[in-house]
Amino acid sequence: MAGKKHSSLDRVLGRLDTLDTANLTFLVQRLARERSLFEDIFNTLQEGVLVINADGVIEYANQAAHRLIGLGENDLSGATLWRLVPGLRPSLETALDSAGPALPVVAREIELNYPESRVVRLYMVPFQGEGRGAARRFAVILSDITRDKQSTEERIENERTSSILLLAAGVAHELGNPLNSLTIHLQLIERRLKKLKPAKDRDSAALSESIKICRDEVQRLDGIISNFLDAIRPRPPDLADTNLSDVLGEVLQFQQGELEDRRISVEAEIPEVLPVVMADRNQLKQVFFNIIKNAVEAMQPGGTMRIKTRVDDDHVYLMFGDTGAGIKQEDLVRLFQPYHTTKPDGTGLGLMIVQRIMRDHGGQVGIESKEGVGTVVTLQFPQKNRRVRMLK
């Protein structure tokens, strides 16, 4: 069996007691240089690297580990990992308590909430020093996978949404065929009726009126299906320079009749000119219409809807607040799920479509609600100059 290879440094350390002062000084300097080299290498890594003992006490941490955990060198060195990440110790018991030469390697995904919320993949690799009775240690490698996790979840959600919307579009399209057939047959019945009976006959007039009502209702249903298909059919936005104030004003004017009928007052603090955003006007109208409609339906007559704006260096925010009944906590987390609705006649697609349109515009939608107080929906749009900087 081949013997273990030793470096020149190992051989020098093996006869340490025979070295004179000059050689000892040279050896210390060399050890310091090698330590500095290894630290520089570890500090260039994007992954956090920790070395802990069996009790979780941190013996070494590179700069990335300090950054991920949010503690400085003086705070992290000598700290206990189990206290910094509560709940981690129980999930690693098998590896920590294992004995024998085949020590397990552990992988976990954990969520860190300080200094900011992020998802970290943790690998823990056990190792043991040379010599009998050498203490067991663990190398802990931390990788920030927050963006990967978010993009994966968003992709899965988008695929799920697209599948549901395509299914809904298919059903709506199939409903159009019998409606067309009904329209044709109603026209035939109306023509036959005119030939069979004189126009002055009372029963004939009543029957003609019924047929007209049926035709009007069929046309109304056909219009609903057409609008529904336009709303849910995924299509890329036709982006152009847009002033959000103009688009919102058009939607409020269109819904003015419904707002007055339900005695809903609108308090809008909207400047005439906001920073330009790149947007599809028609899709934005759909977003505003859905949000305002939800707010109106959530309030009793006499309620108030407040619309405010906020601007920072990168974004434009529109906030829609209502004085409705609010949303239950268990419903709040499911608002963007398809077909989930709290309204008896709701489809459960409105907010999902809003979210899809906002994502296509590079924006976000957020909802805050409290039962008995009301709901605030916040739309976040990237300013045009920020979108340009992102694309460069």
Image (spheres, rainbow, N blue to C red):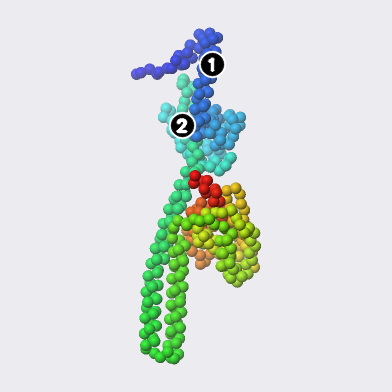
The reply to whether residue 140 is visible in this rendering is no
> Mark 2 touching mark 1, by CB under 8 A?
no
Q: Position of residue 176 (x, y in %)?
A: 40, 69
- Looking at the image, which residue is at 52% across and 60% down? 281
- Residue on which the image places disc 1: 28
Up/down of 301 relative to 338, above or below: below
* Among numbered discs 2 and 1, the one appearing first in the sequence: 1
Frontmost of labels 2 and 1 is 1
Residue at far left of view: 1
The amino acid marked with disc number 2 is Val
Left/right of residue 322 with respect to residue 355 in the rendered view: right
Q: Position of residue 23 (x, y in %)?
A: 52, 11
Up/down of 188 relative to 138, above or below: below
- Residue on which the image places disc 2: 125
Q: Quadrant of the N terminus?
A: top left
The amino acid marked with disc number 1 is Val
Q: For this rendering, which residue is in front, 362 or 153?
A: 362
Q: For this rendering, which residue is in front, 109 or 270?
A: 270
- Looking at the image, which residue is at 49% across and 27% down? 41
Res. 340 mark: none
Q: Position of residue 359 (x, y in %)?
A: 50, 53
Q: How far apart are labels 2 and 1 at the CA level?
A: 30 Å
Q: For this rendering, which residue is in front, 122 or 97?
A: 122
Within 10 Å of disc 2 (Cα), the crowding (few <14, some 14-19, many 20+) is some
Within 10 Å of disc 1 (Cα), the crowding (few <14, some 14-19, many 20+) is few
Up/down of 105 relative to 278, above or below: above
- Looking at the image, which residue is at 64% across and 68% down? 302
Q: Secondary structure at mark 2?
A: strand
Q: Secondary structure at mark 1?
A: helix
Q: Count all numbered tags in the image, as a single digit.
A: 2
